[in-house]
């Protein structure tokens, strides 16, 4: 199923907010500044892998490809293309 | 909501709460002090102690459950019974100290002293050092976990500033989780079987002193990395282990430091077993889940011969954590603990002690205290000082606040010597700030 970038962003926003205990999350808020820790981020990556049927663990994504909802959505979108 | 909190007289406890209550009672009997912890905020200036005390007393009025104790209800489920608090002011202490070293010494004594009355579970400590100060919340784990304690301090800060609708902000967790007893039993079998396997080959610290621990005190070695060092550690963690993978990086460093300083004291073919907490607060604003224990555990196992502070080992730690999050064991522990609620204290104590065999406890708390200020002063650092460590091992706890990293090594007096703890802390600081192998 092809998803648009805004759709991916919405899915991620919802999940990030859930992991952070309901705290609102902006598209460009860095995850580390919102208090997300290692376990929370692993949980987010596991969600992304299951939701979008992707393998992120062994990919070459750098911190720059992961640190906000917008850039993560962009990375996912590129991988899905 | 206010009526709800103030008129409630009891609430049911979950399985982890019940285990902590059993451990707390056992610790009180054996060591004169329960399972307590403290969270310390380092402030950039001093506060008005009298004002702080008054606000604290006003604040506590909203939470009758802080004077409570665990009882068995008519349905045999352990419950927290709220006690009348009339004529019992909340514990508050204010002292003056000349230096940070003196303040830390005071905090160590405070957490080892614990609570004399079974119905006391909280104490706010204020230490004035003239140009700066510290505030500490000492708590026992029957009422709060570390994350909850920091949220409670934050709520108090907001109350102090007149911002928080205190009673409306806090809700108690649901009474009894609906897990069928068959599922609880099966989860229990899985936990027992897995813990037996894990503990079979666990390396402890079999020093002569640890076989006959006389002292009831826990010792703490705390330190802070400055801003530059902290930034470098985070940068290296991101480069080595991946974005936000600070916990695997710190754990790899801690294991290596331990192995280099103390690894020779037990068999080379043994494994280090690490216990970590996983926060189970999930939905709704976090203020709604301040009280009691909202976490479970998982265990990581590392062969001694694999330990080295290298990219490969950090990657191994990261993948172990990833596996631990997905394999469902931490959920099994939660479910199995529900069944323990129906068992007598002595069975619970024996079960937990027979199954608990770990070398380390480890945690990394990221920004749980969510404000830069506390009651008008700027917060310069947050330190977690738990009176928790394996009986033949150590606890290593890190916390991060506003980009600054703080570390604490905890051990029961006699498990290792003071000089060994110094060397261990120095080795760990050195490892984390040096370039990792394979970079």
Image (spheres, rainbow, N blue to C red):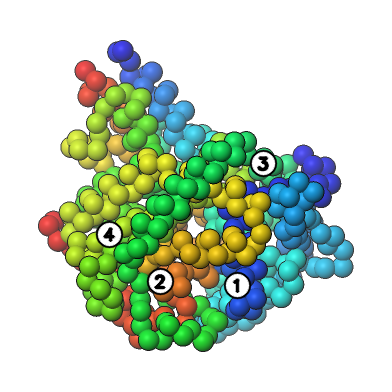
On residue B176, the disc is: 3
Distance, label 2 to label 3, CA atoms, is 34 Å
**Residue lying at 29% horizontally and 24% vertically, measured from the top left:** A53
Residue hosting label 2? B394
* Mark 4 neighbour class, 10 Å CA radius: few under 14, some 14 to 19, many 20 or more: some
Q: Choose between B170 and B196: the one closer to the eye.
A: B196
Residue B351: x and y in percent read: 53, 61
Return the residue at label 4: B302
Q: Nearer the viewer, residue B3 or A73?
A: B3
Q: Chain of mark 3?
A: B
Measured from the top left, where is residue B384 in percent x and y?
50, 65
Q: Earlier in the sequence, mark 1 or mark 2?
A: 1
| Contact? badges 1 and 4 (CB < 8 Å) | no
Disc with the residue nearer the chain's start (4 vs 3): 3
Checking the image for residue B27, the label placed there is: 1
Q: CA distance from mark 2 to mark 4?
A: 16 Å
Do the residues at discs 2 and 3 belong to one chain? yes
Q: CA distance from mark 1 to mark 4?
A: 29 Å
Q: Is residue A12 above or below residue B420?
A: above
What chain is tagged by disc 2?
B
């Amino acid at each position: 199923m092809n998803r648009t970038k805004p759709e991916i962003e919405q899915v991620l926003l919802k999940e990030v907010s859930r992991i952070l205990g309901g705290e609102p999350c902006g598209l460009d808020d860095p995850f580390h500044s919102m208090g997300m820790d290692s376990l929370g981020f692993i949980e987010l990556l596991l969600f992304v892998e299951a939701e979008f049927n992707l393998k992120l663990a062994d990919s070459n994504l750098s911190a720059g490809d992961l640190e906000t909802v917008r850039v993560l959505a962009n990375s996912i979108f590129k991988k899905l293309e | 909501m206010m009526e709800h909190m103030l008129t409630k007289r009891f609430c049911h406890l979950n399985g982890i709460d019940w285990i902590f209550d059993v451990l707390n009672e056992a610790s009180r009997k054996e060591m004169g002090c329960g399972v307590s912890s403290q969270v310390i905020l380092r402030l950039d200036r001093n506060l008005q102690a009298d004002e702080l005390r008054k606000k604290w007393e006003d604040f506590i009025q909203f939470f009758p459950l802080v004077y409570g104790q665990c009882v068995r209800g008519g349905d045999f489920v352990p419950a927290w019974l709220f006690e009348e608090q009339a004529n019992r002011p909340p514990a508050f202490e204010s002292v003056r100290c000349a230096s940070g070293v003196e303040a830390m010494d005071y905090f160590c004594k405070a957490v080892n002293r614990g609570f004399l009355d079974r119905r006391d579970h909280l104490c706010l400590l204020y230490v004035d050092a003239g140009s700066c100060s510290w505030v500490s919340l000492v708590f026992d784990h029957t009422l709060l976990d570390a994350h909850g304690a920091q949220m409670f301090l934050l709520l108090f800060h907001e109350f102090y500033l007149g911002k928080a609708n205190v009673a409306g902000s806090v809700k108690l967790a649901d009474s009894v989780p609906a897990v069928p007893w068959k599922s609880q039993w099966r989860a229990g079998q899985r936990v027992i079987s897995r813990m037996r396997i894990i503990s079979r080959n666990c390396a402890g610290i079999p020093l002569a002193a640890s076989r006959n621990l006389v002292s009831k005190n826990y010792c703490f070695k705390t330190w802070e990395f400055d801003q530059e060092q902290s930034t470098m550690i985070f940068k290296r963690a991101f480069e080595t282990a991946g974005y936000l993978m600070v916990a695997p990086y710190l754990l790899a460093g801690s294991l290596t430091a331990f192995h280099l300083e103390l690894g020779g004291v037990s068999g080379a073919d043994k494994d280090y077993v690490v216990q970590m907490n996983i926060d189970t607060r999930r939905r709704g604003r976090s203020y709604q889940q301040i009280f009691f224990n909202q976490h479970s555990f998982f265990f990581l196992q590392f062969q001694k011969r694999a330990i080295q502070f290298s990219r490969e080992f950090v990657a191994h730690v990261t993948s172990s954590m990833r596996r631990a999050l997905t394999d469902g064991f931490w959920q099994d522990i939660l479910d199995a603990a529900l069944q323990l609620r129906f068992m007598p204290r002595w069975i619970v104590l024996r079960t937990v002690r027979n199954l608990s065999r770990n070398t380390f406890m480890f945690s990394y708390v990221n920004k749980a205290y969510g404000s830069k200020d506390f009651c008008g002063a700027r917060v310069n650092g947050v330190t977690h000082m738990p009176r928790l460590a394996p009986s033949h091992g150590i606890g290593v706890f890190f916390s991060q606040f506003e980009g600054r990293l703080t570390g604490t090594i905890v051990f029961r007096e006699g498990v290792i010597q003071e000089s060994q703890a110094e060397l261990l802390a120095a080795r760990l600081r050195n490892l984390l700030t040096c370039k990792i192998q394979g970079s």
